[in-house]
Image (cartoon, rainbow, N blue to C red):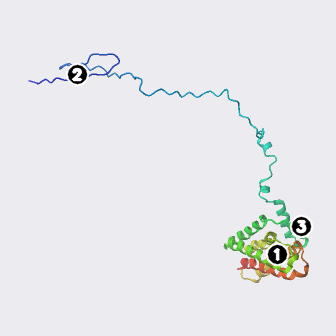
Amino acid sequence: MAKEFTVRPVIFPSSTPSTPYTRRPGSSSPPPPFQTAPRTSGPLPFIPFDIPSTSSAPPPLYSGVPIASSSSGYFEDEPPLLEELGINTRQIWRKTVSILNPIRLDPVLHEDGDLSGPFMFLMSFGLFQLLAGKFYFGIVLGWVIIASLFLYSTFNMIAGRNGCLDLYRCFSIIGYCMLPMVIFSAGSLFLPHGGTLIFAIGMVFVFWSTWVCTSLLLRLASCGDEHRGLVGYACWLVYLLFSLLVIF
């Protein structure tokens, strides 16, 4: 005979009072569904988040430059980018043409020194040497700096108080006179090394660079032709070193 146990009644909260449900032994009816109690106001106060209206505030005043109707009109007065960087391509081309024609050399074009043209020629010289299997970029830049200091000190010692050559213009002249060396570096790619032909051609380009550099230094620094031999010898030593980089 089975023993019966008494089960305590289960009370579910509800909004309306209800009688507790007691499960009777032996009944198969399901219990009533669970009902949640309604939410009651807690102890925390209600905080409104309404944004106050700003319609009464005056509109902001704009005192800047009026916006242009089109981008082309706004930038029409802007100078070109190369001009802002200090690179005058037309002046570089004129100086290059004057170096290519040493008989009609115009020293007036080289009165204003720049570093854009010399840097381009030095990189071209190193690039042609790189095509020949020689990595000379650092050597070329170092030698040009040392050569500029050498010619600057040598010329000022020769000219004395009459010399008016600054280091910036000296570097510009040496860099532009590297153009014959650049041509020689490009032509050496098609010449046999180790023969007398490349030495003879190299001496021609060394004389070309020496003549142009000496003429520019003497005319721009307002120095007489009585020191042409000393200045020319110093320039010849500088460009002879660059020709040896090409030959060997």
Q: What residue type is labelled 1?
A: Ser
Q: How many labels does the image show?
A: 3
Dot 2 alpha-carbon crowd within 10 angstroms: few under 14, some 14 to 19, many 20 or more: few
Query: Is 124 situated left or right of 220 in this image?
Result: left
Q: In this view, does 51 lie above or below 112?
A: above
Residue 95 x, y percent position in the rendering: 84, 66
Residue 170 x, y percent position in the rendering: 81, 72
Q: What residue type is labelled 2?
A: Pro
Q: In this view, does 235 lie above or below 111?
A: below
The residue singled out by tag 3 in the image is 108
What mark, if any, has residue 9 been given in the picture? Answer: 2
Q: Earlier in the sequence, mark 3 or mark 2?
A: 2
The residue singled out by tag 1 in the image is 209
Q: Residue at x 74, y 73 (%)?
A: 145
- 98 or 188: which is nearer to us? 98
Residue 151 x, y percent position in the rendering: 80, 77
Q: What residue type is labelled 3?
A: Val
In the figure, residue 41 lies in which quadrant? Answer: top left
Q: Which of marks 3 and 1 is nearer the N terminus?
A: 3
